[in-house]
Amino acid sequence: MASDGQRVATHTRNLAEFTGSFPTDIRPTEGENEVPMPDLDGETLRIFLQYVHHYRQPNISSLLPEKLARLAEAVEKYEVYSATEVCRLQMQ
């Protein structure tokens, strides 16, 4: 669940497999099927999740600087290595 209350579907297995910060036996902490991500709004969470699925990586070149910064902080915090360099390059 995002900080603005939006719910975005994903598989916890993807969070565990494609990030370095979620344990492989991740268990939701709120509700039956929710993993709270209070530092991400719904829009940023949707972009973030594209990096933890077998999707083409999103084009982030048109993100506003503040949204890019939020995404960059999230991929660094949750250790999404496939996105950290992309975000760094876009921020330059």
Image (cartoon, rainbow, N blue to C red):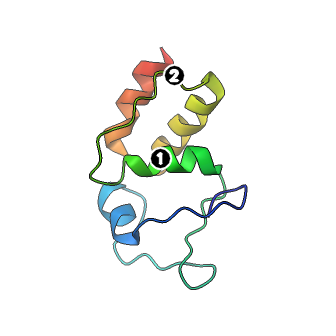
Labels 2 and 1: the sequence-earlier one:
1
Which three-letter amino acid code belongs to the residue tagged 1?
Phe
In the picture as drawn, the residue positioned furthest to the top comes out as 92
- Residue 74 picture location, percent across and down: 53, 45
Relative height, residue 12 to residue 68 (above, below): below
**Which residue is depicted at the point 59% across and 79% down?**
29
| Contact flag, marks 2 and 1 (Cβ < 8 Å) | no
- Residue 78 picture location, percent across and down: 46, 51
- Residue 13 picture location, percent across and down: 34, 70
User: What is the quadrant of the N terminus in the image?
Assistant: bottom right
Q: Nearer the viewer, mark 2 or mark 1?
A: 2
Q: Nearer the viewer, residue 87 or 79?
A: 87
Quarter of image, res 70 = top right
**Which residue is depicted at the point 44% across and 52% down?**
49
Residue assigned mark 2: 62
Which three-letter amino acid code belongs to the residue tagged 2?
Ser
Q: Nearer the viewer, residue 73 or 42?
A: 42
Measure how far apart labels 2 and 1 are at the Cα level. Answer: 15 Å
